[in-house]
Image (tube, helix red, strand yellow):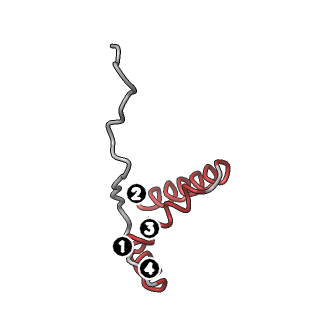
Protein backbone atom coordinates (compact mmCIF):
# COMPACT_ATOMS: atom_id res chain seq x y z
CA UNK A 1 0.00 0.00 0.00
CA UNK A 2 1.33 3.42 -0.90
CA UNK A 3 1.15 6.34 1.45
CA UNK A 4 0.65 9.91 0.33
CA UNK A 5 2.77 11.36 3.09
CA UNK A 6 4.91 10.45 6.05
CA UNK A 7 3.74 7.54 8.14
CA UNK A 8 1.97 8.58 11.29
CA UNK A 9 2.31 6.88 14.62
CA UNK A 10 -0.74 5.28 16.10
CA UNK A 11 0.28 5.59 19.69
CA UNK A 12 0.50 8.37 22.18
CA UNK A 13 3.77 9.93 23.16
CA UNK A 14 2.79 9.09 26.73
CA UNK A 15 2.42 5.60 28.11
CA UNK A 16 0.52 4.32 31.10
CA UNK A 17 1.88 1.19 32.73
CA UNK A 18 0.30 -1.02 35.35
CA UNK A 19 2.57 -3.24 37.42
CA UNK A 20 1.80 -5.85 40.04
CA UNK A 21 3.86 -5.57 43.20
CA UNK A 22 3.88 -8.00 46.06
CA UNK A 23 2.55 -6.55 49.32
CA UNK A 24 6.14 -6.28 50.57
CA UNK A 25 7.28 -4.44 47.43
CA UNK A 26 4.29 -2.10 47.57
CA UNK A 27 5.02 -1.30 51.21
CA UNK A 28 8.70 -0.70 50.46
CA UNK A 29 7.77 1.63 47.61
CA UNK A 30 5.34 3.49 49.86
CA UNK A 31 7.93 3.82 52.64
CA UNK A 32 10.68 5.05 50.30
CA UNK A 33 8.31 7.51 48.65
CA UNK A 34 7.23 8.83 52.06
CA UNK A 35 10.85 9.16 53.16
CA UNK A 36 11.59 11.20 50.04
CA UNK A 37 8.41 13.25 50.30
CA UNK A 38 6.98 11.84 47.07
CA UNK A 39 3.88 10.01 45.98
CA UNK A 40 4.62 6.33 45.30
CA UNK A 41 3.67 6.72 41.63
CA UNK A 42 6.10 9.64 41.29
CA UNK A 43 8.93 7.59 42.79
CA UNK A 44 8.13 4.67 40.46
CA UNK A 45 8.03 7.04 37.47
CA UNK A 46 11.39 8.54 38.46
CA UNK A 47 12.93 5.09 38.91
CA UNK A 48 11.81 3.99 35.44
CA UNK A 49 12.98 7.27 33.89
CA UNK A 50 16.35 6.90 35.60
CA UNK A 51 16.71 3.32 34.37
CA UNK A 52 15.81 4.32 30.81
CA UNK A 53 18.26 7.24 30.88
CA UNK A 54 21.26 5.01 31.50
CA UNK A 55 23.49 4.16 28.57
CA UNK A 56 22.68 0.98 26.66
CA UNK A 57 25.22 -1.35 28.34
CA UNK A 58 24.21 -0.22 31.81
CA UNK A 59 20.54 -0.49 30.95
CA UNK A 60 20.93 -4.01 29.60
CA UNK A 61 22.87 -5.12 32.68
CA UNK A 62 20.26 -3.59 34.99
CA UNK A 63 17.38 -5.12 33.04
CA UNK A 64 19.02 -8.56 33.18
CA UNK A 65 19.55 -8.18 36.93
CA UNK A 66 15.89 -7.26 37.45
CA UNK A 67 14.65 -10.13 35.29
CA UNK A 68 16.86 -12.64 37.12
CA UNK A 69 15.66 -11.42 40.52
CA UNK A 70 12.03 -11.67 39.38
CA UNK A 71 12.55 -15.19 38.04
CA UNK A 72 14.06 -16.25 41.36
CA UNK A 73 11.20 -14.67 43.27
CA UNK A 74 8.54 -16.34 41.12
CA UNK A 75 10.28 -19.71 41.47
CA UNK A 76 10.21 -19.38 45.25
CA UNK A 77 6.54 -18.39 45.23
CA UNK A 78 5.47 -21.24 42.92
Report if the CB atoms under discs 2 and 4 are less than 8 Å apart. Answer: no
| Picture layout, residue 67 above or below residue 22 | above
Q: CA distance from mark 3 to mark 4?
A: 9 Å
Q: Nearer the viewer, mark 2 or mark 1?
A: 1
**Residue bearing mark 2:** 78
What residue would you read off at disc 1? 23
Q: Which mark is residue 44?
A: 3
**What separation in Å lies between label 4 and label 1 (alpha carbons)?**
15 Å
Rendered residue at 41%/71% (across/down): 42
* Residue depicted at x 32% and y 36%: 10
Number of other residues with Cα within 10 Å of mark 4, as a class: few under 14, some 14 to 19, many 20 or more:
some
Badge 4 marks a residue whose secondary structure is: helix
Crowd band around label 2 with a 10 angstrom C-alpha radius: few (<14), some (14–19), many (20+) = few
Asked whether disc 4 touches disc 1, contact meaning CB atoms under 8 Å apart, the reply is: no
Identify the residue under disc 4. 33
Tell me the mark number nearer the camera, choosing from 3 and 2.
3
Q: Earlier in the sequence, mark 2 or mark 1?
A: 1
Q: Locate residue 75 relative to residue 11 in the image: left or right.
A: right
Mark 3 and mark 2 lie on one chain; the one further toward the N terminus is 3
Amino acid sequence: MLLDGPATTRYSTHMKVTIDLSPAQAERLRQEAERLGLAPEDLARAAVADLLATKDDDFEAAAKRVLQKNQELYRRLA
